[in-house]
Image: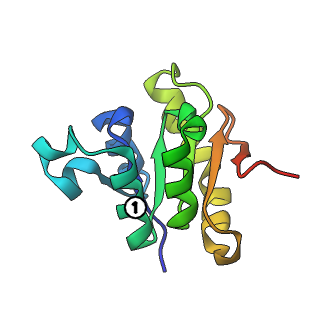
């Protein structure tokens, strides 16, 4: 099954377009919920939607790991969520970080036995699991 992503609206259209140009399959909240409704959809709803389709999630909201409802949703729906470590990266650095991490993200998403997890994507593409807390 090819890897597909659902991008949080906070990444912006330019980041999604560049990832698509790099041949990643990236869906936006507007694609899934419509332009108007995508502005109102709760994090738990779009995360659950991604999980129902076995899509991974992309966001720049690394604080999501501190919100109990969102963490539980990631785990309950078996979602791999990848959040940029630095939400203030410029456009080019956001794209570069995700592209540098894409091979490892694909490996992690192929591992069905690991369940839902939240990973932080560093600027250089390194990934660090942040939820559930590593032993």
Viewer-nearest residue: 78 or 13: 78
Q: Residue at x 60, y 35 (%)?
A: 66
The picture places residue 27, in percent across and down from the top left corner, at 32, 56
- Side of 53 relative to 35 (left or right): right
**Image mark count:** 1
Sort mark 1 into few (<14), some (14-19) or many (20+) by Cα contacts within 10 Å: many
Q: Nearer the viewer, residue 22 or 42?
A: 42
Image location (x, y in percent) of residue 1: 49, 80
Up-down relation of residue 55 to residue 86 (above or below)? below
Q: Residue furthest bottom?
A: 1
> Residue 127, percent across and down?
71, 45
Q: Establish if 51 lies above or below 19.
A: below
Q: How is the image coloured?
A: rainbow
Above or below residue 90? Residue 50 is below
- At horizontal 40% and vertical 61% (from top left) the residue drawn is 48
Query: Residue tagged by mark 1?
Result: 48
Q: Quadrant of residue 83?
A: top right
In this rendered view, identify the residue nearer to me: 43 or 111.
43
Pick the front one: 32 or 94: 32
Instruction: Answer left or right for 76 relative to 29.
Output: right
**Residue 24, image x and y in percent?**
43, 58
Position of residue 51 relative to residue 99, above or below, is below
Residue at 32%, 34% in the rendered image: 12
Callout 1: SS: helix
Determine whether, in the image, residue 45 is placed left or right of residue 37: right
List the single residue furthest toward the right: 135
Residue depicted at x 20% and y 38%: 39
């Amino acid at each position: 099954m090819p890897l597909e992503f659902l991008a949080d609206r906070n990444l912006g259209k330019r980041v999604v377009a560049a990832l698509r140009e790099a041949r990643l399959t990236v869906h936006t909240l507007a694609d899934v919920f419509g332009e108007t409704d995508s502005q109102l959809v709760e994090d738990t709803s779009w995360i659950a939607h991604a999980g129902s389709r076995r899509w991974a999630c992309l966001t720049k909201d690394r604080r999501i790991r501190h919100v109990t409802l969102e963490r539980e949703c990631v785990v309950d729906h078996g979602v791999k969520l990848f959040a940029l470590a630095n939400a203030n990266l410029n456009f080019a650095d956001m794209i570069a970080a995700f592209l540098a991490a894409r091979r490892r993200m694909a490996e992690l998403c192929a591992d069905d036995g690991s369940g839902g997890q939240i990973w932080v994507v560093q600027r250089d593409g390194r990934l660090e699991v942040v939820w559930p807390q590593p032993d």
